[in-house]
Amino acid sequence: MKLATWNVNSITARLPHLQRWLAGARPDVLALQELKCPVEKFPAQAIAELGYTAAVHGQKTYNGVALLVRAGLPWREVARGVPEFDDEQARLVVAELDEPGSEAPLIVASAYFPNGQAVGSDKFAYKLGWIDALASWIERERLAERPFVLMGDFNIAPAPEDTHPDWPQDGILASPPERAAFARLLSLGLVDAFRRFPQPPQSYSWWDYRQGAFRRNLGLRIDHILVSPAVLPRLRACTIDVEPRRWERPSDHAPVVLELAPMEQFNAMAQRAII
DNA sequence: ATGGCGGCTCGCAGCCGA
């Protein structure tokens, strides 16, 4: 079982990259952010031809999220937008997957956290309010006590090692209130899958288009996959695939990929552990 | 300090992203 998240910065502009990357990586689930596309213009046909079905929460120009699910894997959409949070902006879509051999469904979410623009701005307040509503929903639904994977563009670099050395640690994407909001998600029991494995130093998932930031590796790690404890024993690897960032006319984000042991193998292991 | 790049739009300039 392979899951991934990718902020594509316009699904229309990035469709060739999406096709190329999906054909090579073949994840079972891909969470997309920044579609910048209303649902009616979502390229469902091209996605279907690649062997994927999709849950889409879109809007014109800005935001927009989707979950692509490999054809043959049964799923249903369970939320579009943060439940009980009044929001004009399309930033969350949630689905349940029925994995073969699994008793409980795997809940997967594609989230596009607000950017926040500048610390102290109106958009910053909206960002913190949005994350608060997300965390409250996770708490209410007790998602941390169920098999749950929250993936997306969090627009938060959780720790100093998640920013290049010159990035201001009190500025947007790294500020104490944003890191506290991220920490609240962890305090619910969710775990940053990337940090469960040894990683190369200065691993980032986003690089500014300007000033040759990618070439100089002046990036941030702001795209994340958080998993609930129920999923933890299945973790096999979590990596950032920087390859598509090298392609022509790339997204400014790279995909983050999570590999889980297949449920059958996990059941067999659990069986042996009991014996 | 600014803008730099790239995507978007009732588009040729301005907004937004991070």
Image: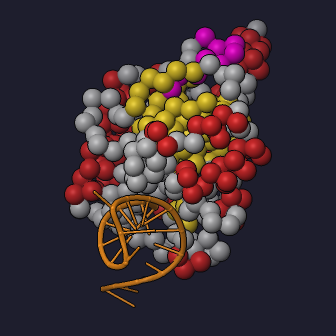
Vertical order, A80 against A126 (above or below)? above
Image position of A66 (left or right of A242): left
The image position of residue A237, as x and y in percent, is: 70, 41
Q: Nearer the viewer, residue B11 or A16?
A: B11
Q: Is residue A105 visible?
A: yes
Any part of residue A273 in sight: no
Colour setup of the view? secondary structure
Q: Quadrant of residue A118?
A: bottom left
Q: Quadrant of residue A87?
A: top left
Q: Which residues are magenta?
A: A95-103
**Where does the image place residue A91, in percent across and percent down from the top left?**
40, 42
The spot of residue A54 in percent (x, y) is 56, 32
Q: Please check the rendered image and state whether residue A233 is part of the magenta-colored stretch, yes or no.
A: no
Residue at the (56%, 17%) spot, across then down? A105
**How many numbered marks does the figure carry?**
0
Q: Residue at x 61, y 30 (%)?
A: A53
The stretch drawn in magenta includes residue A100? yes
